[in-house]
Image: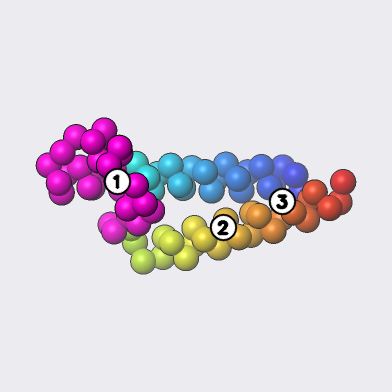
Amino acid sequence: MKRLVAVLWIIAVGMTTYTSTRAIAEQSRAAGRSQFHVLVSAGDKLLTWHGAPSWYYPAYWTLVIVTVVLTVLSWRRT
């Protein structure tokens, strides 16, 4: 179970990284600014990647919730 939880955490962090980097790239192209400037000035706007497919965020949040629940359950077993 702990290996499954570790794999799920790696996938969740990977999805978060992918989403953030895509959002930064899209916003820098749209604004005509450097990616560094967008990263520094964006704040909470990076939480929404507008170019994501419609299934992405429901799948992401389901993965995060399942991962957290399995983490808590695995901690209770030890």
Q: Residues within 10 Å of mark 2 (few under 14, many from 20)?
A: some
* Residue 41 counted in the magenta span: yes
Count up the numbered dots: 3
Tell me if 7 is positioned left or right of 30 in this view. right
Give the extent of the magenta segment. Answer: 23-51
For the residues labelled 2 and 1, say whether their Cβ atoms are less than 8 Å apart. Answer: no
Q: State whether the magenta stretch is mostly helix, strand or loop.
A: helix
The residue that label 2 is drawn on is 63
**In the structure shown, which secondary structural element does the residue marked by tag 2 occupy?**
helix
Q: CA distance from mark 2 to mark 1?
A: 25 Å
Q: Residue at x 69, y 47 (%)?
A: 4
Q: Residues within 10 Å of mark 3 (few under 14, many from 20)?
A: some
Mark 1 lies on a secondary structure that is: helix
Q: Which residue is mark 3?
A: 71
Frontmost of labels 3 and 2 is 3
Query: Marks 3/2: CA distance?
Result: 12 Å
Amino acid, disc 2? Leu
Residue 23 in the image: x percent, y percent?
30, 48
> Residue under circle 1?
42
Q: Is residue 26 magenta?
A: yes
25 or 53, which is in the foreground?
25
Question: Residue 41 at x, y = what percent?
Answer: 27, 42
**Which x, y percent locates residue 31?**
15, 46
Front residue of this view, candidates 55 and 78: 78
Q: Is 50 on the left or on the right of 70, as rendered? A: left
Residue mark closest to the camera, 1 vs 3: 1
Q: Which numbered disc, 1 or 3, marks the residue that appears first in the sequence?
A: 1
Quarter location, residue 22: top left
| Identity, as a three-letter code, of the amino acid under mark 3 | Thr
**Measuring 71% from the left and 55% from the top, which residue is drawn there?**
70
